[in-house]
Image (cartoon, rainbow, N blue to C red):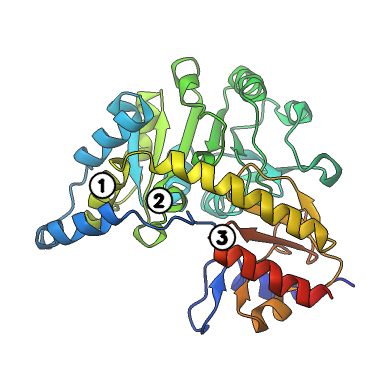
Amino acid sequence: MVEQVNKDETMSRFQHGGDTYGMKDVVDFSASLNPLGMPVQVIRMLKVKAASFEAYPDPQCRELVAALAEHEKVPAERIVATAGARDAGARITEALKPRKVLVCSPCYSGYEQAFQLARPRVVHHSLVASENFDVTERILDYIDPEIDLVVLCTPNNPTGRVISHELLRKVLIAAASCDAKVLVDECFIDFTDSASCTPLLDEFQNLIIVKALTKSHAMAGFRLGYCLCGDSELLEAIRSSGAPWAVSSPAQVAGVAALGVPRYLELTREYVAEERAKLEEGLRECGMQVVPSHANFILFQSPIPLYDALLERGYVIRRCGNFRGLDASWYRIAVRTTVQNKGFLAALREVVA
């Protein structure tokens, strides 16, 4: 049985996870945030700095960019702070004004929505379920001289699959031969054992990387992300395409404090890997088709409708029928705390029993 979802309603009401406002006594498995929660050091620093918030934010985010540069091991001149990944997408669209964009499906829809500001032709490269929706060398066949921009996510949302640096390099070379840019979304890379592709910035001027502290440090309410690029002119165009005070003072303070927490991301990766394995095993035991994930979320297909039944039991999951290439039988769940994950699996067993 396939859960029936009105496509227009799904697109408008359930475009993203995390909208639990108006719900009572629920555990949100629809938003993929760090299960360790916002570092306490961030909360303390916000209290210390609260009096300074009456002034305008630093429009150049100097202290934040310096902290990001140290964190990423790249020159500060290669970084632009943004109000989250969606703001980054809008800035990149304004800076490039692409006419033809290549995206994968299924994939995060925020970029495609941002591209509509420039009204480009969007070409979709469909990923294959039997291959765990991995991006393969077949994508190279889609990069032609008309392509202005190639968009990739690693790990991909909602699949949780990473792209090898070997394939990224091939994509960058193919795009460069067509004078095209490559946008690589690494917003969830800190949850994986994979290295960032930032070292490729030295080699490829057509590479734009987008990251965010939103997910990795459980700070979704601050809207805090950043772009990295080796092309100084392009990076300046991206910077100039945003509002002068887009990143608020609290967000800047929170970002600096978060980046200074020792071993936070290391502990996060260990915790997520252990809990993700338990969730994937539990999902399979309940008859779900699971896409093995490298990230802090899991995509799976269910033989029966799940959303309403789990909501009745206090658990909100992400319906994925509005992702291009998926239907209403697909769902995504976040990796949360041990107790919450056990509770979710117990509720799922009740539903499928």
- Residue position marked by numbered label 1 in the rendering: 257
- Residue position marked by numbered label 2 in the rendering: 217
- Give the mark nearest the N terminus, 1 or 2: 2
Above or below for 44 versus 124 = below
Q: Amino acid at mark 3?
A: Thr
Secondary structure of the residue carrying numbered label 3: helix
Q: Amino acid at mark 1?
A: Ala
Numbered label attached to residue 338:
3
- Give the mark nearest the N terminus, 2 or 3: 2
Using the rendered view, name the quadrant where residue 315 is placed: bottom right
Is residue 186 visible from the viewing direction of this image? yes
- Give the mark nearest the N terminus, 3 or 1: 1
Secondary structure of the residue carrying numbered label 2: loop
Residue at x 45%, y 48% (from the top left corner): 216
Residue at x 45%, y 43% (from the top left corner): 267
Q: Amino acid at mark 2?
A: His
Badge 3: how crowded within 10 Å, few (<14), some, or many (20+)?
some
